[in-house]
Structure formats: C-alpha cells, structure tokens
Image (cartoon, rainbow, N blue to C red):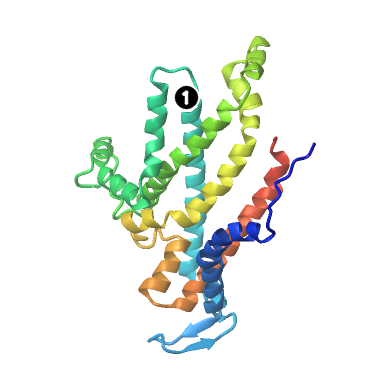
Amino acid sequence: MDRRVVFPNRLLPYLLLAPQLAITFVFFYWPAGQALRASFQRQDAFGLRSEFVWFENFSDLFEDPNWRDAAVNTLIFSASVAFLAMAGALLLAVMADRDLRARGAWRTLLIWPYALAPAVAAVLWGFMFDPSIGMAAHALQALGIAWDWKLNGTQAMLLVIMAAAWKQVSYNFIFFLAGLQAIPRSVLEAASIDGAGATRRFWTIVFPLLSPTTFFLLSVNLVYAFFDTFGIIHALTKGGPGKATETLIYRAYLDGVVNLNLGASSAQSVVLMLLVIGLTALQFRALDKKVHY
C-alpha cells in the first residue's frame, strides 16, 4: 500500500517552502541577476553613471593577459587542492575504519580542522612556514632548501595549495568514513577467503563501492577550490608574490572591490559561474556512467 503525505490545506506546502525559497532568491538569484546585469554595463570613475556596453567587458576580459594567467593559476590550484584533499581524506578514513584503540577520539581529532575558518587556517600555515620564525621553514632550510614563499611564487602557490587542502580534508574524511562503514563486511570477508590481499580488496571492492561518494566529493571540492578558498589566499599571500597565487575569484575581488571596476568584476563572476557549472555538468556526463550505486 502506497502511503502519501496529504496536507489538509493546499496552501500549506507553499507556506512551508516559502522561507527557503525566499532565502534562495535573496541570497542567490537576486545577486546573480545583479551581477549579470552589471557585466553588460560600464560605470564612470565616480560610480554616478553607467553605460550599456553589451559584451565589451567580456571581450576586454579575454584579451587581458593577467586574467588568462589567473585562469591558469586557478586550474592548477583547483586540481591540486581537490586531489590532495581527497587522497589524504581517503587514506585517513581507511586507517580510522580499523579496530584501533581510542578510535572515537582519533575520529574527533581528524574532524576538528573543518571547524576552522579559512583565514585562520591560512594564518596557522603562514606561521609554520614563515621564513623567519616558522618551525617548518627552519626544518626545510636545515635540509638545504632555500624556502621563502614571500619571494618565490612557486613556493607560495605550494603553500596555499597545502593550506586549502588541509582545511578540506576533514570534510572529505567524514563522507569517506561513512562510505566505508556502509560497505558490508561479509563482502570483504568473502574476498579475503578467496585469497585477495588488502590492496586488491581495496581497488577491486572498496574503491568501486565508494564511487558515489568520490563522485560527490569531486564536485564539492572543485567548487570549494574555485570559490571558498578566497579567505586563504587573501590572508596568506594576497595573490602574490607577483600575481603567482592570483586566482579567478581573487582577481574578481581586486577588480571589483579594490579597483572599483564593477563591470569587469561582474563579467569575471559570470564567467567563473559558467565555468563551474560547465565543469560540474561535464563531471556528471563523463563520470556518472562509471559510478556504481
């Protein structure tokens, strides 16, 4: 017998959905519409008058070499953060899923970093790898590595990647651990009886069964790397040295907030939004066929 929820009043479902729909409209659709409208306009230096310029902001954007460099930095940064955060979380989840002493305490400690704000995580990593007072920096210098991320762009990019990935590991760890605990133990025991070792069991049984979780986290981590890492970059490097860590979201901030070029900043926001939507759609189309539910 199919049981359905029946509301006594037809208006009640819409009233229950109204608060969430209002929040979505006010904080997502309305700002997105304002950004889309501003991307086709150009304001004067004092912000008193705007002119409709069609696609000039977008054409100027694609011809700007600084924006193209920021796009390359974003691709490198996002791919690196997603890979490191997911690989590290999967390794920790596999280790925490075993029968360990004080297993609950270890899991709690591994989840804690997710409670930190991105700016706080950036400050912590900045202190550890500070060329003058950082313990990690002194260890690297003792090994003969000339470490100074404030002057070396490659080292600065490496530092923000590590800080952003470390911040996201805890989030991924929660989902991977839940996915591991949902795998029936009888399946693993049967494979063990058949002579499959731990490594083979992982790659032939565990990892394929984790494919829905992995697919979901891949999308979430790419969105996180594109948008939510602004606080890490702003608190740690401010896009430097020499624009080495300037990503698309930080470039939009510089043009819109610092340089007060709202048209260019809005055009960058629209392009970034379309880029993320395209990447997510591509993931669903290319990877969804290989996911085992």
Disc 1, SS: helix
Say which of 20 and 91 sits in front.
20
Residue located 43% across and 18% down the image: 100
Residue 86's x, y, as percent?
A: 51, 39
Q: Residue furthest left?
A: 133
In the image, 151: left or right of 253? left
Q: Quadrant of the N terminus?
A: top right
In the image, 15: left or right of 89? right
- Rendered view: 99 above or below 163: above
Q: For residue 87, say whether it is visible.
A: no
Residue 141's x, y, as percent?
A: 25, 40
Q: Residue furthest front?
A: 8
Q: How many marks?
A: 1
In the image, 161: left or right of 199? left
Residue on which disc 1 sits: 95
Query: Which quadrant would residue 103 be assigned to in this image?
Result: top left
Q: Quadrant of the C terminus?
A: top right
- Rendered view: 57 above or below 108: below
- Rendered view: 30 above or below 159: below
Q: Check disc 1 and give the amino acid type.
A: Met
- 10 Å crowding of disc 1: few (<14), some (14-19), many (20+): few
Query: Which quadrant would residue 47 be assigned to in this image?
Result: bottom left
Q: For residue 209, say whether it is visible.
A: yes
Residue located 46% across and 25% down the image: 96
Residue located 37% across and 26% down the image: 105
Say which of 109 and 192 sits in front.
109
Residue 129's x, y, as percent?
A: 28, 44
Q: Residue furthest right?
A: 1
Residue 230's x, y, as percent?
A: 41, 57
